[in-house]
Image (tube, rainbow, N blue to C red):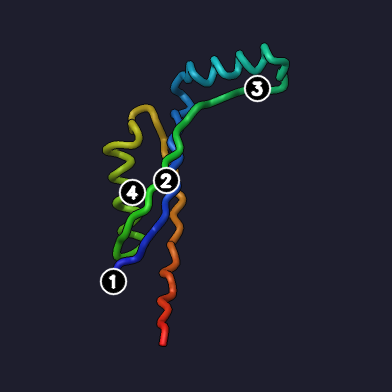
Amino acid sequence: MTQKYFAQIYVTLRPSVLDPAGTAVQSGLQHMGYDNVERVRIGKYVEVTLTAAGESEAREQLDRICDQLLANPVIENYRVELTEVPVAMETTTA
């Protein structure tokens, strides 16, 4: 039996990688008067809904998806938050 899962995936640059977009946003914020902003890093957010035989299978598949398509493992890290989607109760009418 398969189960449906909802994944929230956060992809961020590794700390050692320069982030020109984040630097530009930080500079813009400082020009707007937000002098208290010390650091800005830009990343990606992806939502995926999938079916799998279990949570471990879903996580394994999501790891492959991230490594092969969503993130560049050389310069990016990713984090997956996985939630099981409840099966809707079937209603019968008499």
Query: Residue 24 occupies which quadrant of the picture?
Result: top right
Looking at the image, residue 65 sits to the left or right of residue 31; the answer is left
Between label 2 and label 4, give the one nearer the viewer: 2
Alpha-carbon span between mark 1 and mark 3: 49 Å
Which sits earlier in the primary sequence, circle 1 or circle 2? 1
Task: Please report contact status of discs 2 and 3: CB closer than 8 Å, yes or no.
Answer: no
Between label 3 and label 4, give the one nearer the viewer: 4
Pointer 3 residue: 38
Task: Please rate how many residues cluster around mark 1, counting C-alpha atoms within 10 Å: few if below 14, some from 14 to 19, many from 20.
Answer: few
Which sits earlier in the primary sequence, circle 3 or circle 4? 3
Query: Could you say which disc has been placed on residue 84 in the image?
Result: none
The image shows residue 91 at horizontal and vertical percentages of: 42, 78
Which sits earlier in the primary sequence, circle 2 or circle 4? 2
Q: Amino acid at mark 3?
A: Glu
Which sits earlier in the primary sequence, circle 1 or circle 4? 1
Task: Please rate how many residues cluster around mark 3, counting C-alpha atoms within 10 Å: few if below 14, some from 14 to 19, many from 20.
Answer: few
Give the residue at x 36% y 62%: 4
Pointer 4 residue: 62
Alpha-carbon span between mark 1 and mark 2: 23 Å
Pointer 1 residue: 1
The image shows residue 34 at horizontal and vertical percentages of: 71, 19
Give the residue at x 42% y 83%: 93
Give the residue at x 43% y 43%: 9
